[in-house]
């Protein structure tokens, strides 16, 4: 069981704190929506860049801008993922 889920690429996901905001790991958009769930976990889709996958970032609203800037600054490739 993967209820912890934190092993997937980082610490920022699946921490179900209400004040966290989901953002797209590719473009930093907050327009990410849960589209499906299955054996591999939830799947999310970004309405802005079309990203689809099990991995989204969850950040505090206070950190949102910083994350979005970082994601834009290395938009060529999500190397760290
Ligand atoms: Zn996106």
Image: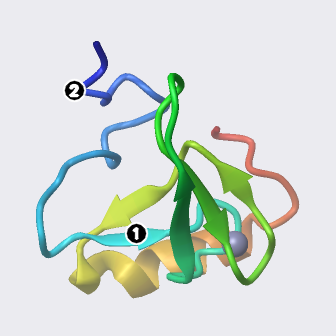
What is the quadrant of residue 75 in the picture?
A: bottom right
For image coordinates 52% across by 32% down, the residue present is 38
Residue 7 location in percent, x, y? 37, 22
Residue 16 location in percent, x, y? 17, 54
**Element at badge 2?**
loop
Residue 31 location in percent, x, y? 56, 83
- Judge whether 20 appears above or below 69 on screen: above
- Judge whether 13 appears above or below 49 on screen: above
Distance (Cα) linking label 2 and label 1: 17 Å
For image coordinates 70% across by 77% down, the residue present is 72
Residue 55 left/right relative to 72: left
Query: Which image quadrant shows ligand 1?
Result: bottom right
Q: Mark 1 packing: few (<14 Cα in 10 Å), some, or many (20+)?
A: many
Residue 76 left/right relative to 51: right
- Judge whether 11 appears above or below 31 on screen: above
For image coordinates 34% across by 47% down, the residue present is 13
Residue 64 left/right relative to 68: left
Q: Quarter holding the N terminus?
A: top left
**Element at badge 1?**
strand
Label 1: which residue? 22
Residue sitting at the far right: 76
Q: Mark 2 packing: few (<14 Cα in 10 Å), some, or many (20+)?
A: few
Residue 8 location in percent, x, y? 45, 28
Q: Say which of 75 and 6 sits in front.
A: 6
The chosen color scheme is rainbow
Q: Which mark is residue 4?
A: 2
């Amino acid at each position: 069981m993967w209820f912890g889920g934190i092993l997937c690429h980082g610490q920022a996901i699946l921490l179900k704190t209400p004040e966290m905001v989901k953002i797209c790991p590719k473009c930093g958009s907050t327009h990410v929506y849960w589209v499906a769930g299955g054996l591999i976990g939830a799947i999310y889709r970004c309405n802005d860049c079309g990203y689809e996958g099990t991995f989204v970032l969850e950040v505090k609203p206070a950190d949102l801008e910083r994350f979005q800037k970082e994601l834009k600054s290395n938009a060529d490739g999500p190397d760290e993922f």
